[in-house]
Amino acid sequence: MTIRVLLADDQTLVRAAFAMLVESARDMAVVGQAGTGREAVELTRGERPDLVVMDIRMPDLDGIEATRLIAADETLSGVKVLVLTTYDTDENIVEALRAGASGFLVKDTRPAELLDAIRTVAAGEALLSPGPTARLIERFLRSPSTPATGGPECLSDRERGVLALVARGLNNAEIADVLDLSPLTAKTHVSRIMGKLGARDRAQLVMVAYESGLVTPGTMGS
């Protein structure tokens, strides 16, 4: 199955480089390129890609607002957003996650890692670049709480354990291995947790886990 990717970045050369990289993967195809946030939203509505690679800093409409508009559009519920950050300069990555992004990656990541990130997010997993995660979550803990409808107190002990592993970046197969469960059971636990917490996706589960104190930045796995 081909992953349909839309690229949004205000730098033409960066978009061209990303396009060449994505097109080099047999399981991916570029279906559109946007130079502004507003163009990204319009192209997403027209092309219905599986995933948007979204830069934060763009003219007309920044990546955060573009992500928020995409996430709020019920007709685009199947579209995932992977946000790119320059780490040292971007101060809004937590807001991007809160707006509906399913993950973020630093811009200087290696090409193979970007392709793997696209596959991960397109498959429904959250992806949080290990380096910036602790610093960004610490900032999040000092900001207003997420709009989740519940907290870990509504979960069973097993579900809290699963949530902690999700927050540390483990996928369903890895959670199953740690807890000696079948992958299907682990997936079922994650789905139930999302329902109980009113979370959009695994990225928001990560934020809820940190905000509640269930997991602290210092315990984040690499």
Image (cartoon, rainbow, N blue to C red):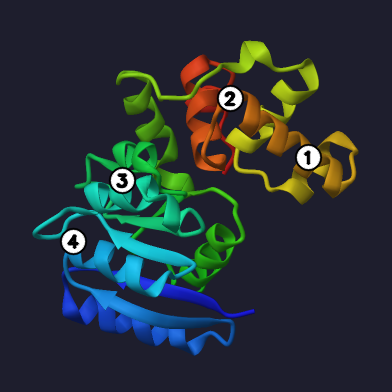
Extreme front residue here?
A: 75
Height in image: 44 above or below 98? below
Residue at figure coordinates x 23%, y 47% from the top left = 65
Instruction: Judge the density around disc 4: few (<14), some (14-19), many (≥20) Cα neighbours within 10 Å.
Output: many
The first of marks 3 and 2 along the sequence is 3
Question: How far apart in space, not on screen, are marks 3 and 2 (Cα)?
Answer: 20 Å
The first of marks 2 and 1 along the sequence is 1
Question: In what quadrant of the picture does the C terminus appear?
Answer: top right
Give the left or right position of residue 181, taking residue 61 as reference.
Answer: right
Question: How far apart in space, not on screen, are marks 4 and 2 (Cα)?
Answer: 31 Å
The first of marks 3 and 1 along the sequence is 3
Label 2 belongs to which residue? 197
Height in image: 180 above or below 214? below
Label 3 belongs to which residue? 68
- Tell me, yes or no, whether the two marked residues, 2 and 1, touch with CB atoms within 8 Å: no
Height in image: 178 above or below 111? above
Disc 2 residue type (three-letter): Leu
Residue at figure coordinates x 46%, y 68% from the top left = 114
Question: In what quadrant of the picture does the N terminus appear?
Answer: bottom right
Question: How far apart in space, not on screen, are marks 3 and 4 (Cα)?
Answer: 11 Å
Residue at figure coordinates x 18%, y 71% from the top left = 35
Q: Which mark is residue 188?
A: 1
Find numbered disc 1 in the image and state the secondary structure of the residue it sits on: helix
Question: How far apart in space, not on screen, are marks 3 and 1 (Cα)?
Answer: 27 Å
